[in-house]
Amino acid sequence: MIHTTRSNIILIIDFGSQYTYLIARRIRDMHINFIISKWNISKIELMEIRPQGIILSGSPYSVVNIDSPQISVEILNYGVPILGICYGMHTMIHQLGGVVKKNLVREFGYEKLSILHDNILLYKKNNIKTCKKNYTPIVWMSHEDSVHRIPKNFINFANTKNCKYAAIFNEKRNFYGVQFHPEVTHSSGGKLILKRFVKDVCNCISTKKYKLSVDKIILNIKNTIKNDKVILGISGGIDSFTTAVIMHRAIGKNLFCIFIDNGLLRWNELNEIKSILKNINNFNLIFLDEKKRFLNILSGINNPEEKRKKIGQTFFEIFGEQSKKLDAKWLAQGTIYPDVIESSRNLENRNLIKSHHNVCKIPKKIGFSLIEPLKKLFKDEVRLVAKKLGISKNIIFRHPFPGPGLAIRIVGEVKEEYCNLLRLADKIFITELKKANLYSNISQAFAVFLPIQSVGIMGDARKYEWVIALRAVRTVDFMTANWVRIPYKILNLISSRIINNIHGISRVVYDISNKPPSTIEWE
């Protein structure tokens, strides 16, 4: 066991989980310092960090596989508390002599947690809330593998219906493992569990309070850009709009915002964007009609990843053309953390969730540099920045619209006919949500075009036409999301309007899947 002075830092070992940065976010909210490192951190790096506690993240890997990543013996013997989350729990137990197996019954979603023993993480005698009889918190599970036998000196202190070892600990070594994900907003009391580990088990002390400073972001932009010109692709969504406003505050007339009509926009999007932006003084705005260009490059492409990459490459090509005309040296983007996380690949570049058009690799021939002032912020933090900038509420809470637009809301090949049908269906959906005063209570709602023909009967005549799926979710950070229970009466009205008013649609379905295991967008 290593004895050394601790640094009041939590070390997060990343095994390629999309939730690693959510763990970091929760710790940052406690005003505790943290460092994220890959699983193969060296002994020298470990000694330099001198962590006061270690958290092992989840992973797309399975410890059942021979080539799965494992932590070093130095980490296990370092002498500080360790919390393993999902895969992090599995690899710790596996390396300490326990057994992990693939389950016949998977758990994806909410599960009731039964607490078996008093424990500092989940059950404290001096905590009134958790002392209630039969206290069963709801937690978020996302796993196929489970612990089947725990190592010597470990105690099982919680389970679920299908998971015998949902939470375990070794009191002597201060090793903890939880099968569920306390870092996601879906796990009730999840933040408290992490707080107890960090503060009560690891004895970390809160330092300087993290402050989201708009002035600091602006200063960083000024110091980076200096007197150079910058172009920014603006879509009217909160991310790109906030980026535009904060960049404009920093560099003024040297910012050139480009709105590209790529033929994949929502109904009346162009006019709405113009209306949103017209009140900003001295705002350089360029509108480009590139509908044919985008539809041509998407012709015949069915794979969603290929669609995203083609769109991303075409955006960069256009920005490159404009940068030469304007002599701009920088491209600003409204990239935020969830974009980066979902587009990042794991340790060996094999587990991509999905690419984001604004996280694609910039072609070398384009010749400009990237600036992404919001890249380390989550959606709720972007909204906080927007509020500080004085951006109106109708923009702040406008539902997000992805850069690839309708291309990822049309399953399979993108055709102009499909785009036109989808625009109309989406317009009806959003209009009725606003009429019913539901829009502001939903984080994101949209229609999806399914290239599946379905039999219908209209006016005693047989119809064989397309299917529209409706999607509405509620979320805080867009890393996890719940589907919204729209009243049946409203869904019935929306369905009737879509089928009656759009020639070519014969069926409407409603998506009732959460994230995870589903993503918010269909492609």
Image (tube, rainbow, N blue to C red):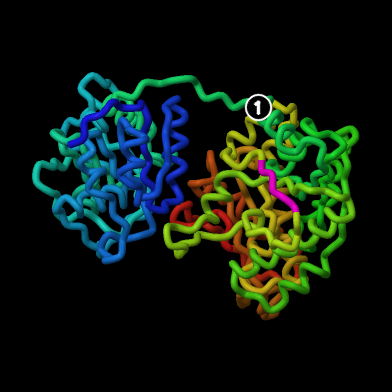
* Closer to us: 163 or 340: 340
- Rendered view: 162 above or below 467: above
Q: Position of residue 166 (x, y in %)?
A: 24, 46
Q: Position of residue 164 (x, y in %)?
A: 19, 50
The range drawn in magenta is 368-372
- Residue 371 is a magenta residue: yes
The quadrant holding residue 221 is top right
* Kind of residue indicated by mark 1: Lys
Hey, which residue is sitting farthest front in the picture? 44
- Residue 260 is a magenta residue: no
The quadrant holding residue 108 is bottom left
**Residue 418 seen from this side:** yes
- Rendered view: 271 above or below 318: above
Q: Quadrant of the N terminus?
A: top left
* Closer to us: 182 or 177: 177
For residue 284, side relative to residue 83 (left or right): right
For residue 326, side relative to residue 499 (left or right): right
Write down the residue under mark 1: 216
* Closer to us: 36 or 407: 36
| Helix, strand or loop for disc 1 | helix
Q: Position of residue 520 (x, y in %)?
A: 55, 54
